[in-house]
Image: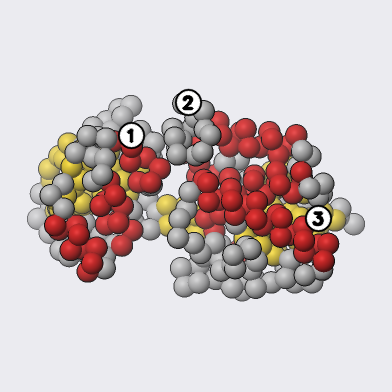
Amino acid sequence: MAHLCDTIIIGGGPAGLSAGLYAARSRMDVLIIERAKYGGQATTTDELENYPGSEVNCTGTSLSERMRKQAEEFGCKFEKDEIIDVQLEGDVKVIKGKKDTYETKTVIIATGANPKLSGFKNELELRGKGISYCATCDADFFTDLDVAVIGGGDSAITEAIYLTKFAEHVTVIHRRDALRAAKSLQEKAFANPKMSFIWDSLVDEAIGDEILEGLVVRNKFTNETSVLKVDGCFVFVGYDPISALFEDKVTLDKAKYIITDDDMRTNVPGVFAAGDIRKKSLRQVITAAADGAIASTIAEHYIEEGK
């Protein structure tokens, strides 16, 4: 018979690590199951200046490792496995991995979300070296520099407007001839003297060896290409929540994010969600960590009180 944990956390990013730390510190028998590397999306950030109390030259990787060690010191256990199925109903939840099967009283889902890639050449090679997917995280690094934003929806234009507080100039590259963002956002964007627009165009390639130097932009109708010299490129073409495993298991919204209440409860008793996987307005390391702390605390109350 599998060992029965108090809580199993699926995902070892900031939300999962925070949940593990809080659960272990409360003397819960807690296991974090991670399929890849601890830290999740945070590990793609070379500099992490906006996490309260972060050290000089703090990186997403170094912060994640400190989180992991801290959780481990309190007694949190870790397992590398890829989860292939979950049975979430009832008092005992069954988590099936490729390597093993696990049983637990409560589950915290912290599988996160991946930013959608635009798909141009060298996008991955220059990620974190001028190419970013989070203006709130990285805007300060591009103070008084020229940047591009790829996308035309609400998030892209909101972030582009935010970037004008830091950058010298922001060029929005959109594959259509009109923005999809709300009219109020469009009005602000078109009125902003620090913003310009390239329409009906795609980015074919990022130029640069160790750091981004420019973008090869192609008009999708004429196929004419030009080089846009920029120091930064922010890609906002959406996120993909890593939630396929939980479809028909917990309630998701139309975008496939898990719906929770303020205490991270899903619609299934004893099952919680934390971090980027859940429907929320701000996806940052600090909000993921806060979600994890709340989820494990409420999971403890659930075990003690049976609700």
Q: Which is nearer the N-term, disc 3 or disc 1?
A: 3
Residue 144 in the image: x percent, y percent? 22, 34
Vertical order, 164 against 184 (above or below):
above
Q: Amino acid at mark 3?
A: Asp
Marks 1 and 2 close (CB-CB < 8 Å): no
Vertical order, 268 against 125 (above or below):
below
In the image shown, does 156 or 100 lie closer to the viewer?
Answer: 156
Residue 43 in the image: x percent, y percent? 51, 38
Neighbour class for label 2 at 10 Å: few (<14), some, many (≥20)? few
Residue 97 in the image: x percent, y percent? 71, 54
Marks 2 and 3 close (CB-CB < 8 Å): no
Q: Is residue 189 visible?
A: yes
| Numbered circle sitting on residue 56 | 2
Which image quadrant: the N terminus? bottom right
- Element class at badge 2: loop
Which residue shows up at 66% across the image and 57% down it?
Answer: 295
